Image: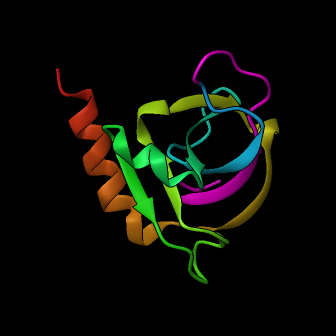
Amino acid sequence: MKKGGIWVIDSGDSSGHEQSGIRPAIVFSGVVAGLVMVVPLTSNSRALRFAHTVQLSPNASNGLTAPSTALVFQLRAIDVKRLEKKIGSSTGEMKLLNKEIRKMLRV
């Protein structure tokens, strides 16, 4: 599991506005204590109205089948057992994602 890999994950049940269910996500860290940090993706284009999002277009490299929005503001740790299948890589978009995370974490 490398940083930038796009995986289908099962984020399980969530409450409120948290992303849940089976969806693609970008791995954002190496494995630490059986956990990885991920940025969930959504195909709902209305999510772009939120701060700390990045739009991704489907291509052969990332394996996405629809235009997607990376929900950087929902960065979370999940157990590696929730990573179901690697579908691609987001190496081209990692600069944008890194920039957005730095902006979000500015204190």
**Where is 62 relative to 102, above or below?**
below
* Residue drawn at point x = 36 percent, y = 52 percent: 97
User: Where is residue 76, by image quadrant?
Assistant: top right
Number of residue marks = 0
Give whichever of 17, 13 is nearer the camera: 17
Q: Position of residue 106 (x, y in %)?
A: 18, 27
Residue 8 inside the magenta-drawn segment? yes
| Magenta-highlighted residues | 1-17
Horizontal side of residue 105 vs 11, given as left or right:
left
* Residue drawn at point x = 26 percent, y = 28 percent: 105
Residue 34 inside the magenta-drawn segment? no
Give the main secondary structure of the magenta stretch. Answer: loop
Give whichever of 1, 105 is nearer the camera: 105
User: Where is residue 64, by image quadrant?
Assistant: bottom right
User: Where is residue 22, by image quadrant?
Assistant: top right
Horizontal side of residue 42 vs 69, given as left or right:
right
* Residue drawn at point x = 40 percent, y = 72 percent: 92
Q: Position of residue 23 (x, y in %)?
A: 72, 48
Residue that protrudes farthest toward the front in the picture: 46
